[in-house]
Amino acid sequence: MATHAGMTTNEFEKTVKYWIATAKHPQTGRLISEMVYQPMLELLAYLRAHDFNTFIVSAGGMKFMRPWREQVYGILPNRLSGATES
């Protein structure tokens, strides 16, 4: 939390969106957003196709997950639960 202490919610969200758009895996050079576990994406698609509601429950901070959870996982805003708000 020390890395974003004093930031507004909007500033933090902007920083996270920039990170997810530009951060690359050190070995593959691919964007982090392209390195999502494919079987997880396939499972989410399968569940949605069969009328299941999908959620993210994370031990991490929800403020970090919010800006990119829909883009990467297709998880709606009201379907995110985290251990901390930071």
Image (cartoon, rainbow, N blue to C red):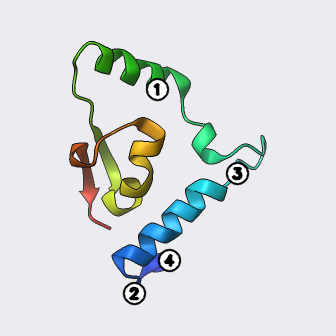
Specify the amino acid type for callout 2.
Answer: Gly
Asked which quadrant contains residue 75, the reply is: top left
Q: Is residue 72 above or below residue 5?
A: above
Q: Nearer the viewer, mark 2 or mark 1?
A: 1
Residue 23 picture location, percent across and down = 66, 56
Disc 2 versus disc 1: distance between alpha carbons? 34 Å
Which label sits on residue 3? 4
Q: Residue at x 62, y 38 (%)?
A: 34
Specify the amino acid type for callout 3.
Answer: Lys
Specify the amino acid type for callout 1.
Answer: Leu
- Mark 1 surroundings within 10 Å by alpha-carbon count, few (fewer than 14), some (14 through 19), many (20 or more): some
Disc 3 versus disc 2: distance between alpha carbons? 26 Å
Which label sits on residue 24? 3
Disc 4 versus disc 1: distance between alpha carbons? 30 Å
Q: Is residue 1 above or below residue 18?
A: below
Disc 3 versus disc 4: distance between alpha carbons? 19 Å
Q: Give the side of residue 47 with respect to residue 28, left or right.
A: left
- Residue of label 2: 6
